[in-house]
Structures are given as structure tokens and as C-alpha cells.
Image: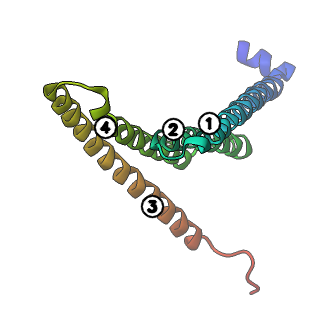
């Protein structure tokens, strides 16, 4: 009965339009917040790099700036995903794989920085061995994860190219 009432009064097309507008508004708000966050993170990385130019012999600043720039790159990729979602109306998995790849590489850099500073922290030999062991395990897992994500991105792109080649061309003249 309610369905018949909705069909007779024409609410169904209007309700769909309302949901589409709300979804678009939420995507737009998310995009604005991501842009602001990205600009702030990029500005913070630039300030950190500028401050680190005075003492360029320490690698800490370089690793931290790279870490911040990779966060910016992740935010840009998420923004791209939102843009593609708004345009096509569907979510694709490739941008999420790219964000995961960037995040994994970022974590590898952070582990490398932390492990290079272990001797400076003055820990005992046992603590250093435990930190080394856990770092190596995490690096191994991240390495495998990076390989899986790269292979997944490659296979997705290859499948997409294969689908594009299978479709008949509309540009050819018969």
C-alpha cells in the first residue's frame, strides 16, 4: 500500500534525487576538508624542511619531511578517489590499493628511521635485540604486503586494458 502511494504521488523519483544531492554534498564537504588538511600538511612539511636546512647533516629531518610528504600524497590519492567516485558513481579499488602502498612504504621509512636511532637511545643489548627482531618481522610483512599490492595494481590495470581492447571501437569507419 505504501509503495502504491509513493508511485502515485511521484515521491520515488524525488526521494532518489534528494539522496543523490545529500551524497554529493557529503562528498563535496569531504573533499574540502581533505584539501584543507592536505594544504596544512604540505605547509608543515615545507616549514620543517626550511628549518632543517640549517642542520642538514642529520637525516632525522629528511626522514620526517619524507614521512609528511607521503601523508600528503596519501591525502591526494584519497581526494582523487572521492573525485572519481563522484564522477562515476562507483567506488574502484585501485586508488585504495595505491593509498595502502603509500602507507606501507611510509611505515617502512619510519621503521628505518627508528632502527637507525636505537643506538642513540642507550637501551640495553636485550632491548635492542628485541627491537631489531620485531622491526625485521614488521619489515618482512610490509615487504610482502607491498609486493601483493603492486601485483594487484598491475593485474587490475592489465585487466582494465584487456577489457578496453575487447570492446569494439566506435571510431572506425565501416
Give whichever of discs 4 and 2 has the lower sequence position.
2
Q: What is the number of the mark on residue 154?
A: 3
SS category of the residue bearing label 4:
helix
Pointer 4 and pointer 3: residues touching (CB < 8 Å)? no
- For label 2, the residue is 64
- For label 1, the residue is 48
Residue placed most toward the observer, 166 or 63: 63
Give whichever of discs 4 and 3 has the lower sequence position.
4
The residue mark sitting in front, 3 or 2, is 2
Pointer 2 and pointer 1: residues touching (CB < 8 Å)? yes
Give whichever of discs 2 and 1 has the lower sequence position.
1
* Mark 1 and mark 4: Cα distance apart in space: 22 Å
**Residue at 73% over, 74% down:** 170
How many marks are shown on the rendered structure? 4
- The furthest residue to the top: 1
* Mark 2 and mark 1: Cα distance apart in space: 8 Å
* Mark 4 and mark 3: Cα distance apart in space: 31 Å
* Mark 3 and mark 2: Cα distance apart in space: 30 Å
Give whichever of discs 1 and 4 has the lower sequence position.
1
Badge 3: residue crowd in 10 Å (few <14, some 14–19, many ≥20) = few
* Mark 3 and mark 1: Cα distance apart in space: 35 Å
SS category of the residue bearing label 2:
helix
Badge 4: residue crowd in 10 Å (few <14, some 14–19, many ≥20) = some
The residue mark sitting in front, 4 or 3, is 4
Pointer 3 and pointer 2: residues touching (CB < 8 Å)? no
- For label 4, the residue is 115
Question: Can residue 1 be spotted in the picture?
Answer: no
Percent coordinates x, y for residue 104 in the rendering: 42, 42
Amino acid at each position: 500500500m505504501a509503495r502504491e502511494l509513493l508511485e502515485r504521488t511521484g515521491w520515488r523519483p524525488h526521494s532518489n534525487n534528494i539522496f543523490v544531492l545529500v551524497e554529493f554534498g557529503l562528498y563535496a564537504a569531504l573533499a574540502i576538508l581533505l584539501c584543507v588538511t592536505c594544504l596544512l600538511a604540505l605547509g608543515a612539511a615545507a616549514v620543517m624542511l626550511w628549518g632543517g636546512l640549517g642542520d642538514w647533516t642529520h637525516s632525522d629531518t629528511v626522514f620526517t619531511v619524507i614521512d609528511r610528504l607521503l601523508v600528503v600524497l596519501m591525502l591526494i590519492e584519497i581526494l582523487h578517489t572521492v573525485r572519481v567516485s563522484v564522477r562515476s558513481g562507483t567506488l574502484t579499488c585501485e586508488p585504495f590499493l595505491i593509498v595502502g602502498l603509500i602507507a606501507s612504504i611510509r611505515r617502512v621509512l619510519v621503521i628505518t628511521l627508528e632502527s637507525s636511532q636505537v643506538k642513540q637511545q642507550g637501551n640495553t643489548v636485550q632491548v635492542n635485540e628485541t627491537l631489531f627482531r620485531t622491526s625485521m618481522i614488521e619489515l618482512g610483512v610490509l615487504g610482502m604486503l607491498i609486493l601483493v599490492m603492486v601485483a594487484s595494481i598491475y593485474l587490475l590495470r592489465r585487466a582494465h586494458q584487456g577489457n578496453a581492447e575487447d570492446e569494439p571501437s566506435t571510431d572506425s569507419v565501416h
